[in-house]
Image (cartoon, helix red, strand yellow):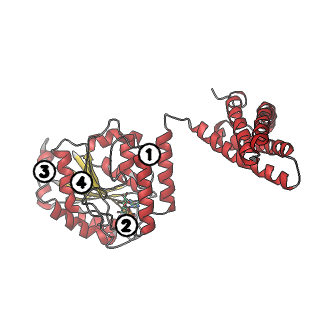
Amino acid sequence: MTQVRGRAGPVWGDDTGAAGGAGQACPAADISIVVPCYNERANVRPLVAALYQALAGRAWEVIFVDDSSPDGTIDEVRAMAERDGRVRGLLRVGRRGLSSAVIEGVLSSSARIVAVMDGDMQHDESCLGRLIDAVAHDGYDIAVGSRHVAGGDNAGLANGWRTFLSDSGIRLVQMILPVRLGDPMSGFFAMRRDLFERTVPRLSGTGFKILLDVFLSAPQRPRVLEVPFVFRPRAAGESKLDILVLMQFVAMLADKICRGFLPTRFIAFSLVGLVGILVNLAVLDIGRRFGADFTTGQWLGTLVAMVTNFWMNNALTYRDRRLRGGRMWLGLGLFMIICSAGAVADVGIARAIFSRDGEWRLAGAAGAAIAVVWNYAVSSTLIWRVR
Ligand code: GDD
Ligand code: MN
């Protein structure tokens, strides 16, 4: 990682090495604007110019965090930093990611307040002053630039598909948020740096949603103010949001929802169980097509699901204590014996439901579900010996 610090000419002048001299050499910034950027070369200069206008009279600096953009964004930042002490560049090598870029940018700051904004001019810099004042003077921990409160607008979202994704994501997120927020997906905010620093150890740090990550990880419930702004269309360059970013978003939410609440192993086992139910149903269906009666079909489905469940759990759920060779076969044997009891219940329940209302899918699934619960409870302790 390389840091670039701009020189401000004579301001740095008196560098005689006298103790205490450094403090007088250059006034420190109260506010660091952290700007994650990837291929934003054309936007660097306009953004700095916009900041000068918007933050006139304040002691600010801007930290561009660039992940070695192929378009040479950092060169543009460096060119400016050479002449302007307010401009800093943080170059990351072999890394990618908006959230982690923001985290490292904030950690490189010593200012009392940090603000985060995009490097593509989509965030309205004229709103920055209000965000900063809310934290600096009005006692808020975090101030969020919001596209979803009165006066705000979403006009800059690329198309209808993105608007739909964004709206559904927001609704999903609002269900688990500790605070009321119109636009929890915003990437435009100001906050107390010390609070951010205390939050860092608990951050997921993946994907695009650093603000959401902060809210879900903060050690205390933050006092929040939302300030409306108009999300502008991109002037230059292109969006980096893609399917991978969406997957990271889902992974971050799962991580946040489940941590300290449901053990990861239980979630994995349940997912395997779900696949087991599908396997069971598929085999039952095939069996019936070949003329097997319901009971035979369900026995067959149960057996096949038992083997595939064992294999999947051994490979995924209990990956860290995976059984191999002889112990694996022994484990499979034990698994089948344990599950046989569950299977008896499985087929019994499935038959009861089937004979009552003839719903073979419901019957098969209910039977398999009972077997999965049994499998989890017993095999976890006896086969993979999880304490
Ligand atoms: N360092 C770094 N590394 N910066 C990145 C990376 C990365 O991997 N990916 C994106 N960025 C930078 C972009 O260069 C831009 O300055 C900013 O992060 C936002 O990226 P865009 O690709 O322009 O995002 P967007 O316009 O689709 O998303 C915006 O809207 C979201 C809400 O819908 C952003 O404001 C998000 O923060 C916001 O959550
Ligand atoms: Mn953008």
N-terminal label among 3 and 1 = 3
Front: mark 1 or 4: 4
Q: Amino acid at mark 4?
A: Val
Q: Earlier in the sequence, mark 3 or mark 4?
A: 3
Q: Position of residue 303 (x, y in %)?
A: 81, 42
**Callout 1 touching callout 4 (CB < 8 Å):** no
Mark 3 or 1: in front is 1
Q: Is residue 275 left or right of residue 172?
A: right
- Identify the residue position indicated by label 1 in the image: 204
Residue furthest toward the front? 357
Which SS class for mark 2?
loop
- The extreme right residue here reads 291
Discs 2, 1 touching: Cβ within 8 Å: no
Q: Looking at the image, tell me whether mark 2 or mark 4 is earlier in sequence order.
A: 2
Q: CA distance from mark 1 to mark 4?
A: 26 Å
Label 4: which residue? Answer: 227
Which residue lies under the disc numbered 3? 25
Query: At numbered mark 1, what does the secondary structure look like: helix, strand or loop?
Result: loop
Q: Marks 3/4: CA distance? A: 36 Å
The residue that label 2 is drawn on is 157
Residue 139 in picture, x, y percent from top left: 19, 41
Q: Is mark 2 within 8 Å of ligand 1?
A: yes
Q: Earlier in the sequence, mark 3 or mark 2?
A: 3
Whole-percent x and y of residue 230?
A: 27, 64
